[in-house]
Image (cartoon, rainbow, N blue to C red):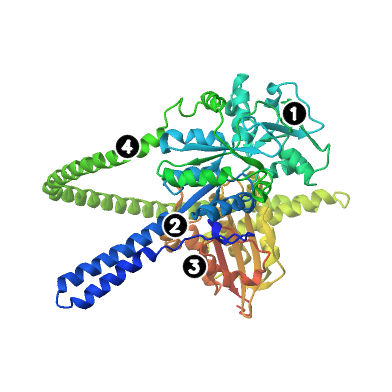
Amino acid sequence: MKSPWSIGSLETKCPVNLRRENTYSLKRPLQAWRIVLSAALLFIGFICHADLALASADTRQDSNDERRKYTVGALAFADPDTVYRRWAPSLARVSAQTGIELVLVPLRPDELVERVSKDALDFIIGNALITVALKKDYGVSHLLTLVPTIHANPEQAVGTAIIAKNTIEINNLEDLKQLELISSDPNAFGGFQIFAGELINQGISPFKDLEHLDFVGFPQDKLLDHILRDSADVAILPSCVLESAIASGRLEEGQLHVLLSQVHPGFNCQTSGSLYPGYAFSKLGNTEHQIARQIVRALLDITEQDPEAKLGRYRYWSVPVEDSQVFNLLMRLERWPFVTNWQRLVEKAIPWALVITIILLLGYFHHLRVKRLVIKRTQALSDEMTQHENTQKALFEQQKQFYRAQRILLTGEMASGIAHEVNQPLAGIRYLAQGSIYRLGDSQSELKQALTKMLQQVDRAQNTVKRFRQFCQQPSVYQACDLKELIEDTLNLMQPDFNRINLKPRLFLWPLTVNVDASLMQQVFVNLLRNALDAMETSPVPQLAIGVSNDSTNAIITFSDAGTGLSEAALKRLFFPFETSKANGLGLGMVVCKRIVEEHGGKIQAFNNQAFPETEIIMRDLGEHFPRFNTGLTIILTLPLKETR
């Protein structure tokens, strides 16, 4: 809401008395009271009466001063300062001539309607449409009509202009359906309302048929910049805006033109439709008619030669003109008085609605009280049933855990036997591959290389089976290993899984040697990567980052994904056996990973990526280029650098 400017603060050539002091009439009664009071000190009651009379007189004087301050709302389609400079001199002259203090407030259309609805205005300087539209609900009375400088006929002072570049031409309003149109505001009289009336005359609905219509706000002259920048094809503006921009040097002649231009005798600007009355000076229904009479007389005294008229860009103020055209426009636009003002009806109905709502609430509270008494009597039975159900659920969960543990034990027994049997065919494959290598000649190097890789995979499979059987009985075999190479080998091994979800991990690796069991550590990496892939199974943009860094004593390996992450409860129990969020999982993968890492003298930690401050200190050595995801999980492994086994 714009800050009001007091007309009394405006600098004019003649000083303006904003408030006329009139205390002489009170001096004689006041002195008489003082004489009576000094002579009747024994009559306390009389003294009190005199004090009350004095206070009442002061209150009447203050109230009289307050009533002589009136607010004038000026409709603003341009910068508020520009609107103020236009109307302030005229109102300052009125204040100087009548002694009535006027406060000028430039307002947008919606702000002006809001002020009127709250009885915060006494007078309005606005267009004919808003004056007529506010007449029924708020008692707005049309007092004077402005005669503009460039148009001698006040009944034909405002029109609409459809402005575009010279490269755009149309034959009728139907052609506008394919163009991009802009206007300042749906309530702008010359800018949009008149244009909408012209469309309705042609059977075109402004909001349904013009699919590319947009409202960009005030001031209105900025719409010309949109056309020049090709942000839109056509601008809907009041008539004379284009001519004013050319006259002020803001535009060059011929840059823009008015589409469907019409000629009206005595009207010096191009227009694209009918003309309507211009600005009007109106009063609100709660404003005293004596005050309005004085202000009207002062405005009628302003002539075309006065500086106030020149600054206000008008000739003079005239009596109200015939406004039947405005009523016809309101009828076409389906606005008051031709449709019901539902907003006003709703405002009047709110007090009754509140009373009915309170009655209904009281009835509802009574219903809740009766319902609570019924619930209270059955609460004991409900608690007992709930307790019984919880007991059954706990028993059922214990049974599930028992059966799961039993399946794990059976699986271990079966795995031991299967491992023993798998070693036999693996050994056979190894002997056959070695025999084939011995029989190959020097010219068959490619086949020999492929068989050699086959032997490496057989050895790896045999080592995996051996570790699977002897994991708990025999110590691991440690050797110097490059973490970068180990991670890259693991990624190559899982490349088909990455291709399945179209994922390319972001790597931040550098050579770093540690003493580890390469086979066991690769199992840890595989398990962590599979968990990350499962968490990103439904992610539209899966992302995975792997980094290697170190401090003075430890190597730090970081796996960070953008998956679904874990709840706080699941995160706390991540390394507990038989805890899993997968439908067919056993809940042993992270337990095995933790056991392997701790066997190497290291540590494994997991953080949700939302807990960024917790991971920032640990991940700082990876540099600012290492991504920090908003979702998912980050697993951090630390392995000792200097320890040897």
Q: Give me the C-alpha separation between circle 2 and circle 1.
A: 64 Å
Q: Give me the C-alpha separation between circle 3 and circle 2.
A: 36 Å
- Are circles 4 and 1 on residues that touch, CB within 8 Å? no
Instruction: Name the amino acid type tagged 2.
Output: Ser
Give left or right: position of 408 versus 7: left
Q: Residue at x 67, y 69 (%)?
A: 623
Q: Residue at x 56, y 72 (%)?
A: 600
> What quarter of the picture does the C terminus occupy?
bottom right
Instruction: Name the amino acid type tagged 3.
Output: Gln
Q: Is residue 183 above or below residue 490?
A: above
Q: Residues within 10 Å of mark 3 (few under 14, many from 20)?
A: few
Residue where numbered disc 3 is placed = 473
Residue where numbered disc 2 is placed = 567
Query: In terms of secondary structure, where does tag 4 sit?
Result: helix
Q: Earlier in the sequence, mark 3 or mark 2?
A: 3
Residue 9, percent from left and from top: 57, 61
Q: Give me the C-alpha separation between circle 3 and circle 1.
A: 93 Å
Q: Residues within 10 Å of mark 4 (few under 14, many from 20)?
A: few
Query: In terms of secondary structure, where does tag 3 sit?
Result: loop
Mark 2 or 4: in front is: 4
Residue 520, percent from left and from top: 58, 64
Residue where numbered disc 1 is placed = 259
